[in-house]
């Protein structure tokens, strides 16, 4: 009886507790903190869950002094909404350079259920070196302050704050900073404050911020000294939606850029001095140049041949390693130092190559460029942070040419697609500079040419040879994947290519040509046999056209609609030339119709002709993408062009017969 009374009491107690919402405190708290009526307003957490997190509040305070030293105070509060948010934000990484900066953690903790404050443990705060800094001593000053945030789970709020002290300017008399308001997660509240001495000139640039009057400017006194305070706060910023093959995110972000250089002339003149200082030739550099041009004879085009000879030896001898153009204060290492190391970043390699060219009296100069990894160059923002690479410019008979010293895959005067057609600035002698647009690539420069010659018999057995010629970017891509590959890995690549359209083929022989010769195009040769390529049915033989399906093209247009332009990166052309010898006394029973498509985004064509005298079928297929960037307006046309062309190839079959006539 006593047990029964106790059981009834427990049941009654649970009912009362449940009615008070105490049995499920998580749901109760979520409702209270949201402060929303489910019947009237959507739940914000559900709305933003797909982003993984939401930035509740961010504050940045930048304090500059007259010596161009800066103290930056950053505080962030991020609400985790899903596993995606846990993966992205539970580990906070703060990069800094010990040569120029000091970092200090002010606080870090996780707030659980709006009431439990979980401080970060001392073992969860570490200063580590990135992999590149461990391997290459010139980057030994690059460190990461890492925070492994405790108790990161759905509904928790990660809070952290740190101070970054720039005790040494990256460039003399220069301070540069950019604060990005727009993120790939929703932002509720973000603010930026700049405090600097009155009389200090500031270049201020606002990107994608329509209401520029929202910047509040006022004079203040700090320790009886006059300062200027700039303040900007923005609320409720939607997340930037990411999309494959899109332009750099920075193009679409709201951000503020600060620079103490107010003229390009002053800034670029100083950067040019840094290069001139590093371009000092020693005996080892002169010896390298002498050896490189030893076989070049004095004739009309000797200067061009000397450049090519020096460049060819240069890219074979020195490796590119780099984190960013601004590392080490935008200051290239001395040419002799880079030579002895055997490696360097873009600015140091450019400086060494310029030094070598100048030894032979060749006009050479550094060119600061922007790549597809960063936004377009904006003349209104006077900052070196816009550039992310350095190449070398030369003049031959009054014409300009450019060299790319960062890779062993590009021949002389050839630029990677990531910087082709992009804007940059040439640093010339005599305190001169020139803003330029680098040469853009044409479709004919980037070709993939497929050739097949062979025969098919009345039983459907196919025998023949394939030659694939990779030009331009295709040659560079293929060379990068092959130059360190083993024989087995090369065979896997060749077989993968062949089995894309002839899965039952037997490779009799294959070979890649010109892997180590950057002045020639990569070439793949395959001899193969396929006993069951065609299907013999009665008096007919049916087979698919002998051409690979370019699934890479299909992946770029899987989306039916786009938010941003489609960045292909480079114009290109695919060509397939096929000659098939047919069985004796056979005739063409079926050939698909001729394909001819064209619009302002590209062209596609396919056509075969039958030579009865030679008993052979000759086919030509082409696909040309005319521009590296497809606008949203033209995307549907481009998508339809690719889908129609690939569908045409996939469904293209040929039927032979000994009875019916073509």
Image (cartoon, helix red, strand yellow):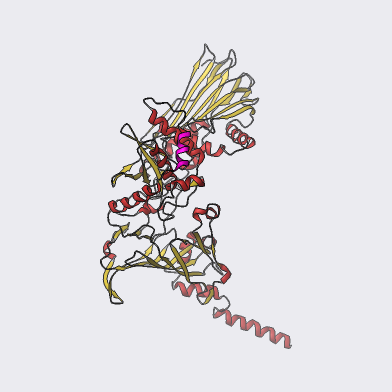
Q: Residue at image x 43%, y 38%? A: 640
Inspect the magenta stretch and tell me whether residue 277 lies in it: no
Dividing the picture into quadrants, the one containing residue 628 is top left
Q: Is residue 407 left or right of residue 539?
A: left
Q: Is residue 575 left or right of residue 488?
A: left
Q: Nearer the viewer, residue 430 or 537?
A: 430
Total tally of numbered discs in the picture: 0
**In terms of depth relative to the viewer, which is nearer, 392 or 192?**
392
Residue 56 image-quadrant placement: bottom left
Question: Height in image: 330 above or below 590?
Answer: below
Which residues make up the magenta segment? 282-291
State the residue at coordinates (56%, 26%): 466
103 shown above or below 346? below
Residue 238, percent from left and from top: 39, 60
How would you classify the magenta stretch by its main secondary structure?
helix
Residue 360, visible in the rendered structure: yes
């Amino acid at each position: 009886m006593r047990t029964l009374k106790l059981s009834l009491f427990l049941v009654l107690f649970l009912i009362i507790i449940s009615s008070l919402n105490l049995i499920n405190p998580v749901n109760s708290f979520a409702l209270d903190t949201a402060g929303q009526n489910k019947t009237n307003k959507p739940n914000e957490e559900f709305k933003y869950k797909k982003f993984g997190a939401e930035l509740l509040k961010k504050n940045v305070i930048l304090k500059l002094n007259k010596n161009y030293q800066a103290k930056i105070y950053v505080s962030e509060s991020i609400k985790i909404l899903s596993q995606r948010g846990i993966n992205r934000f539970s580990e906070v990484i703060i990069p800094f350079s010990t040569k120029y900066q000091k970092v200090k953690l002010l606080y870090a903790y996780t707030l659980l259920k709006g009431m439990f404050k979980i401080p970060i443990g001392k073992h969860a705060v570490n200063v580590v070196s990135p992999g590149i800094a461990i391997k290459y001593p010139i980057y030994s000053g690059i460190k990461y302050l890492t925070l492994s945030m405790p108790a990161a789970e759905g509904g928790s709020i990660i809070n952290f704050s740190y101070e970054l002290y720039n005790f040494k300017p990256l460039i003399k008399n220069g301070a540069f900073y950019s604060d990005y308001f727009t993120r790939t997660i929703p932002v509720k509240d973000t603010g930026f404050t700049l405090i600097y001495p009155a009389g200090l000139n500031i270049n201020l640039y606002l990107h994608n911020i329509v209401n520029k009057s929202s910047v509040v400017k006022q004079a203040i006194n700090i320790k009886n000294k006059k300062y200027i305070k700039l303040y900007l706060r923005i609320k409720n910023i939607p997340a930037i939606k990411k999309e494959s093959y899109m332009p750099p995110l920075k193009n679409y972000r709201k951000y503020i850029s600060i620079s103490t250089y107010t003229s390009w002339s002053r800034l670029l003149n100083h950067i040019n001095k840094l290069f001139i200082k590093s371009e000092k030739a020693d005996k080892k550099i002169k010896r390298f140049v002498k050896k490189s041009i030893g076989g070049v004879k004095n004739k009309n085009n000797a200067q061009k041949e000397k450049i090519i000879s020096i460049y060819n030896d240069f890219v074979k001898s020195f490796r590119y390693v780099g984190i960013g153009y601004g590392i080490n204060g935008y200051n290239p290492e001395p040419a002799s130092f880079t030579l002895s190391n055997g490696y360097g970043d873009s600015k140091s390699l450019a400086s060494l190559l310029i030094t070598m060219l100048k030894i032979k009296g060749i006009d050479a100069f550094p060119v600061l460029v922007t790549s597809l990894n960063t936004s377009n160059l904006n003349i209104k923002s006077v900052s070196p942070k816009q550039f992310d690479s350095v190449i070398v410019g030369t003049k031959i008979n009054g014409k300009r040419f450019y060299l790319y010293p960062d890779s062993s895959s590009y021949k002389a005067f050839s630029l990677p697609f990531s910087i082709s057609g992009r804007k940059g600035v040439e640093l010339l002698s005599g305190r001169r500079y020139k803003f330029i647009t680098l040469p853009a690539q044409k479709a004919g420069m980037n070709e993939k040419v497929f050739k097949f010659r062979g025969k098919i018999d009345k039983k459907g057995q196919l025998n023949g040879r394939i030659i694939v010629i990779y030009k331009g970017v295709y040659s560079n891509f293929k060379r990068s994947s092959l130059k360190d590959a083993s024989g087995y890995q090369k065979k896997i690549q060749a077989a993968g290519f062949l089995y894309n359209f002839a899965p039952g083929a037997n490779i009799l022989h294959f070979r890649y040509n010109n892997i180590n010769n950057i002045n020639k195009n990569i070439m793949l040769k395959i001899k193969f046999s396929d006993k069951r390529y065609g299907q013999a049915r009665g008096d007919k033989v049916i087979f698919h056209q002998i051409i690979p399906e370019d699934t890479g093209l299909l992946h770029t247009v899987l989306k039916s609609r786009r938010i941003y332009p489609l960045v292909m990166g480079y114009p290109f052309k695919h060509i397939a030339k096929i000659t098939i010898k047919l069985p004796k006394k056979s005739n063409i029973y079926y050939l698909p119709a001729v394909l001819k498509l064209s619009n302002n985004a590209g062209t596609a064509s396919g056509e075969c002709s039958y030579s009865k005298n030679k008993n052979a079928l000759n086919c030509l297929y082409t696909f040309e993408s005319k521009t590296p960037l497809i606008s949203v307006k033209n995307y549907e046309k481009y998508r339809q062009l690719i889908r129609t062309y690939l569908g045409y190839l996939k469904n293209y079959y040929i039927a032979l017969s000994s009875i019916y006539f073509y």
